[in-house]
Amino acid sequence: MNTNKKNVLISSQKNFVNVIMILFFDTVSYLPEFCLIEDNKILFSKKILDDHDDKMSDCIVPIYIELEKKFKLGKKLKYLITVTGPGSYTALRVGIAFLSGLSISMKIPLIGIPCVDLFQYVINTNKKKTTAIYICSSNNQKFMCLYSQDTNECIINKVEKDEIPYIFDTSVVNTLLTNDVSILVDPLLPKNIECKKFDFKKIVLQHVKAILLLPRQEIIEPIYISNNKILS
């Protein structure tokens, strides 16, 4: 065989091996979403719900079957990734249970990562203490994550309906990350706060290699936060 052709063949084989299809399931956002990642690109994404009145338990299987038929997932899928919360208890429970079933039946790894851990990839280490994270989930569940000087970790609190979500010490916090677009134009947002919208799937895409190296868990547990301490 011609040497040049042989080198091209070897190169193409290496590239083929490096192409890995990953299914990321955003169980946290207001409208949960399937996202296919392949070759460091978002191949396809699909919302599980059309609006908040739909039930994930009714929609998740038909949409997955749609993806399976279109992309032949059974032959190509190598990893499953999901965010484990905080979020709606029902959405987290249904979504994680579904992925766990896929993981077992297809014998492929499932990686669960809490939102707070996922954000560590995009928050500058020097700004960790001055950044707040506001998460809007399905079923009108909302959460504020703030760094605690006392415990040296990010503490998650549920935001009740009658609370202003960004009541915090503005002399400490100067950046707010959120997936709630309405906050970006809210006149009550303090003027000195820099507000940035985040997208779970884009964070996963940008840091997928690091996420795939995370320790495997036998059981993926949803993170459900309630102001009722018995339920948390």
Image (spheres, rainbow, N blue to C red):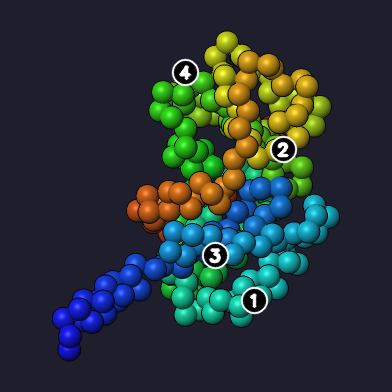
Q: Secondary structure at mark 3?
A: strand
Asked if the residue under mark 1 is in contact with the one under mark 2, i.e. CB atoms within 8 Å, the reply is no
Residue that carries the numbered disc 1 in the rendered image = 65
Give the number of the mark in front: 3 or 4: 3
Badge 1: how crowded within 10 Å, few (<14), some, or many (20+)? Answer: few
Q: Secondary structure at mark 4?
A: loop
Foreground residue among 102 and 179 = 179
Asked if the residue under mark 4 is in contact with the one under mark 2, i.e. CB atoms within 8 Å, the reply is no
How far apart, in angstroms, are the residues tagged by discs 2 and 1? 31 Å
Q: Is residue 122 left or right of residue 191?
A: left
Residue that carries the numbered disc 3 in the rendered image = 43
Badge 4: how crowded within 10 Å, few (<14), some, or many (20+)? Answer: few
How far apart, in angstroms, are the residues tagged by discs 2 and 4? 31 Å
> Does residue 158 appear in this view?
yes
Q: Amino acid at mark 3?
A: Leu
Q: Secondary structure at mark 1?
A: helix
Counting residues from the start of the chain, the first of labels 2 and 1 encountered is 1
Counting residues from the start of the chain, the first of labels 4 and 1 encountered is 1
Instruction: Pinpoint residue 49: horizontal percent, then vertical percent.
Output: 75, 59
User: In the rendered image of this protein, does residue 130 appear above or below residue 223?
Assistant: above
User: In the rendered image of this protein, does residue 208 appear above or below residue 79?
Assistant: above
Foreground residue among 114 and 125 = 125
Counting residues from the start of the chain, the first of labels 2 and 4 encountered is 4
Q: Amino acid at mark 2?
A: Val
Q: Residue at x 39, y 68 (%)?
A: 19
Instruction: Pinpoint residue 188: horizontal percent, then vertical percent.
Output: 76, 20
Counting residues from the start of the chain, the first of labels 1 and 3 encountered is 3
